[in-house]
Image (cartoon, rainbow, N blue to C red):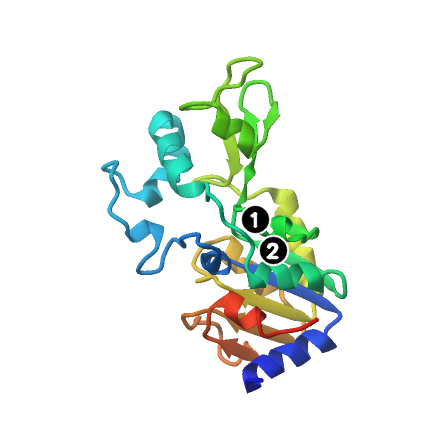
Amino acid sequence: MDSKIETLQNLINSSKRIVFFGGAGVSTESGIKDFRSKDGLYHLHSKYGTSYEEMLSHTYFFSHTDTFYEFYKEFMVPKGVKPNAAHKFLAKLENNRELTVITQNIDGLHQLAGSKNVLELHGSIHHNTCLNCGEHYSLEDIMKLKGTPHCPKCGGLIKPDVVLYEEGLDQDVLRQSIEAISSADLLIIAGTSLRVYPAAGLVNYFRGKHIVVINKEPLYLPADSATLEINEPVGEVFSQLHI
């Protein structure tokens, strides 16, 4: 076993409270594009005349709703993807450790793998709400409705329960995330650039013993703050671990 993988295994085995803080890089091995890498969504040529990053804003949703949904259904709703080794390992680990998964992803793959204690900072594509009457709809409901989805009950516009640019995070999810990180003794940061705030700022609440970073690109954390850094794909790393 590689020395870094062995160190990670030992840290997991010796920790009582673990927080896994993950970003887009956790799901890329399931076939979902990330956002900011050189091959990410934000670097693709937009066929709409507006950057894909700008299209994921509150303003764009309400000013170009039809175009937003055309883009959203094509690029933000993954088709046929399955949990990878990272999702599966964490689901099993939850049965043996006090583990909280905090994710910036909206794909629901952690829950699909079996994880229960998941905090979704940016919401989920699997939850959608009518802005008029408050009725809730699943992803399957939304995909069955052609074009821009409107509530079958009242005709109101349905919005995905995902946090768009210009929108605030759910305060209850934020509070729970802070509590989990501040009480953990091991924080694993994986597949994230730590560039999106306020989510990235949550790592500052960690008061435990060890921080592990698993990311293909090096992260610029304060000097000596990370116990271990592994610059490899997240799923590949977790596939070498055991419970």
Q: Position of residue 61 (x, y in %)?
A: 40, 31
**Residue shown at the point (63%, 53%) measured from the top left:** 113
Q: Position of residue 107 (x, y in %)?
A: 52, 46
Q: Residue at x 47, y 23 (%)?
A: 145
Q: Which residue is mark 1?
A: 121
Q: Quadrant of residue 124?
A: top right
User: Given the current orientation, which residue lies at the most extreme top position?
Assistant: 154
Q: Amino acid at mark 1?
A: Leu
Residue type highlighted by circle 2: Ile
Q: Residue at x 54, y 34 (%)?
A: 139
Instruction: Decide: is 63 above or below 109.
Output: above
Residue 201 as seen in the image, left or right of residue 181: left
Determine the residue located farthest toward the front in the rendered image: 80
Numbered mark located on residue 102 in the image: 2
Q: Are marks 1 and 2 in contact (CB under 8 Å)?
A: yes
x and y, in percent, of residue 193 in the image = 44, 62
Q: How dense is the environment of label 1, judged by Cα within 10 Å: few (below 14), some, or many (20 and up)?
A: many
Q: Secondary structure at mark 2?
A: strand
Compared to residue 143, the image places residue 195 above or below, namely below
Quick check: 159 above or below 80? above
Q: Position of residue 161 (x, y in %)?
A: 54, 36
